[in-house]
Image: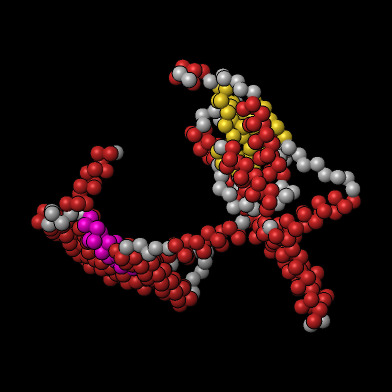
Amino acid sequence: MTETEQKQQKKILVLCVDRDGDLTTKAEIKTPLIGRDRNLNAAVSLALKDPEEPDANAMFEAIRVYDKLLSENNPDETFEIATISGSELGGISADRKIVAELSEVLKVFPANEVILVTDGYSDEAVLPLIESRVPVSSVRRIVVKHSESIEETAALFSRYFKTILENPRYSRIALGLPGLLFLILGILSIFGLVHYYFMAFIIVLGTYMFVKGFGVNKMVKKAYVWIKEYSPPPLPVQISAFSMLAGILCIAIGFYLGYTSASEAVALHGIDFSNWLNVFSPLIAGYFIIDSKDLVIVGICVALTGRAIRWYFERDSRLLRNAVLIVLVGWTRQILESASYILINPKVGYEALIFSIVVGILLGVASLLIMIVIHRSAKGFFKESDKKVEEFKEEG
């Protein structure tokens, strides 16, 4: 056959779809299955595992259709047979698996059209998935016929009952929840507390509905996986995080001490709430500042020191600016102390406050100059960090 004749041939794929994944769960056969021999062996294995399985009948029908098409000896058409499967979980996961396996089949045999063979129960879900990727020229539905006799009906119910017993998806609801309620009833009966059973019934049922409704079980599972697979961050990051927590704790305790001091000042001076904003708010602010300043300043410095340690190990030039900030924050204590004395007693004078501010400005200028000198002398130390900053600016 010449190359031109091969291109003109229509490629037809006889496709059998097992949406609930019985080939994998019952016969332990991996899909996709391409070729007549593989499909026939898989259908026989599945039928031997479960003679009542409709997917096995659908696979035999697909093989029959494939053989019939081959027997017609049409030179303009070439045929292939394949079986793909979904998942026992159903829903989105099953559909995504069907689409992925169909893509694998089309890579091996790029069909122009598909003859779809199903067990008749999943056409509405499967057909749009197939048609979105390749045209479907025919659909063959295989429905297993059941007798209407009482014996056949009982056998059918026993099959579904067996599914409820053995399938964890259904047994948890159909057996697990009622079993728990019966167990609670038995325990309450032993202790003569049956009159509390209705309350226990409501609690158990409400808890189950709450857990399933809000997905608490999934969140707990995700939390367990996160804890199990958790990997601690690098040591500098841990030091920075610990310093931040310690700093926040110090600041919170400092605010609490300031609030306690201000409350004692209110009780001591007997405030009239009609004019406390005009008369006593500076006094309260002074007492609050004088007792909270130490721990607040320490907390901020601890948090900044943790960041400085991290930036030192990361060779980040922000370390120098952070060091200047620590010095200025530390000196802020003197300014706050002088301000608090003025708020408590305005007659003490403001010379100490002005001196603290001037010294703070000079200290900031001196720290800035020292930072520039250190940055120039240790330029090689921060070279890696500076390159990253430059690359980031270029990308921006």
Please identify the quadrant where the C terminus is shown: top left
User: Which residue is at 24% across, 61% downward?
Assistant: 313
Work out whether residue 361 or residue 366 is closer to the camera in this orientation and state it.
Answer: 366
Q: Nearer the viewer, residue 16 or 245?
A: 16
Query: For residue 172, which quarter of the picture?
Result: bottom right
Give the quarter of the image for residue 269.
bottom left
Residue found at x 61% / y 34%: 15
Q: How is the image coloured?
A: secondary structure
83 to 248, vertically: above or below: above
Above or below: residue 92 compared with residue 263: above
Residue 286 seen in the figure? no
Point out the stretch of residues depicted in magenta: 299-316
Tell me where residue 165 appears, x and y as whole percent.
Answer: 73, 61
* Residue 186 is a magenta residue: no
Residue 271 in sight: yes
Is residue 303 on the magenta stretch? yes
